[in-house]
Image: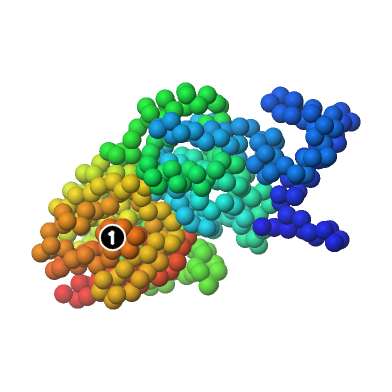
Amino acid sequence: MRSWRFGSWRTDDRWLRKKSICCVARQLRRGSAPVSAPHSSVFARLASGAFYEAIVRLTFCEIIMIIKPKALLALEDGKVFTGCSCGAPGERWGEVVFNTSMTGYQEILTDPSYKGQIVTMTYPLIGNCGVNEEDFESLHPWVEGFAVKEICSFPSSWRSQKSLEDFLKQNGIVAIEGLDTRALTKHLRSAGAMRGILSTVDLDPGSLVRKACSSPSMVGADWVQSVTCAQPYLWGREKIPGSGLKTWEWGKGQNLDLSGEKKFRVVAVDFGMKHNIARHLAARGCELQVVPARTRAEEILAANPHGVFLSNGPGDPAAVPYAVETIRGLIGKKPIFGICLGHQLLGLAFGGRTSKLKFGHRGGNQPVKNLKSGRVEITSQNHGFCVDIDTLPPGEVEVTHINLNDQSLEGMRHRRLPVFSVQYHPEASAGPHDSAYLFDEFMTLMEQYSKE
């Protein structure tokens, strides 16, 4: 939290918010402070002096409820949470989920895998580091809505270019703060992720619950078509923020050089690919041809790549049958590496089935065991569906990784063919780097296969 020192006084942004209320109250006493109609009665009482002396004892949530427009988050089961707006005005529906990451909010907001979802952050203070253009995981935010306990109004980071609240407003993201995110998270854990609606315009709880019940379900939803690229393109040759030359690489700042010799040609099927996946592949000497999700297997093979990458993405994998058919046409013909949705689609192509998890895995602290090495990796995850282990053909597919929280499938490999995948995100961004070795394994697989 950013703080300032005035003589012997040390203050933070909560103190400054309370101080600003006091200043407004003083102005009201003098009749020089315009106040919006919903708050005028409250400020009139403050200005009268009845509550003026007690204002410094107000809680943070009480203060923001006074100075910001009201917002409601309603769930399909009738549960309603009250807070105030900290983003753009409006109304959005989506599947309400929670993410346990303490930071990485910018990467979460711009991850295409969150399309169709209202994301709740379990960590109470979000926005401390502000927002910068280098940490985008796509061209713009994809979340339907954003819910936090408290948003930081005064970010403190040398890389910050704007506050999170300004970023949300500029990108039209409806957001709510001041609600009890701990109660919301506990409710979702016990009842499961569910449909919800976030609104700053309709403040009737009953009306919002009815709208949430009538909104589309995540089951059977193909959100891939909303996030995939429209046309094929070469990564690093297009003017995409956060990509290509001058991109960010941990430990090297802006010094990642993509102009060197390319060892491998890789076709990446874009189901909603994060930028950091492309950065990892490019940094290892791959010329990356990104293609839309509906690209056919024959078109991919015509490019004669050394390997094929299946990206992450949103929605129900069972609702993307065209991608499953494409993958079936590629298995055994080129080395394949899949992540997240790409992993789920590969499981369907192997003949397995997918199912919806109760509340999913979302956060940067998910424990995964590598069954080959015995090591436990702390991973970054974001998924609400998984491949059912028991439905995979055991004679053809080997389980390589499992989730230590619920024993669900986290990684698999074909026993004979150069094909493997993981459910989690080895590229992190944000999150730990324990699993970055998987990109090196893909490089090794392509090198071995190219010699045969």
Residue 280, x across and y down, in percent: 40, 66
Q: Secondary structure at mark 1?
A: loop
Residue 286, x across and y down, in percent: 35, 67
Locate the C terminus by quadrant: bottom left
Answer with the quarter of the image where residue 191 lies: top left
- Residue on which the image places disc 1: 407
Q: Is residue 401 above or below residue 152?
A: below
Observer-nearest residue: 184 or 390? 184
Observer-nearest residue: 26 or 411? 26
Answer with the quarter of the image where residue 54 lies: top right
Locate the N terminus by quadrant: bottom right
Q: Residue at x 78, y 59 (%)?
A: 10
Q: Residue at x 62, y 44 (%)?
A: 166
Q: Is residue 92 above or below residue 299?
A: above
Q: Residue at x 54, y 53 (%)?
A: 123
Q: Is residue 40 above or below residue 346?
A: above
Query: Can residue 357 be seen at all in this image of the molecule?
Result: yes
Residue 134, x across and y down, in percent: 54, 58
Observer-nearest residue: 43 or 314? 43
- Please rate how many residues cluster around mark 1, counting C-alpha atoms within 10 Å: few if below 14, some from 14 to 19, many from 20: few
Query: Can residue 282 be seen at all in this image of the molecule?
Result: no
Q: Residue furthest left?
A: 395
Residue 372, x across and y down, in percent: 25, 74
Q: Seen in the image, is 301 located left or right of residue 370?
A: left
Q: Amino acid at mark 1?
A: Gln
State the colouring used for the structure image: rainbow
Answer with the quarter of the image where residue 339 lies: bottom left
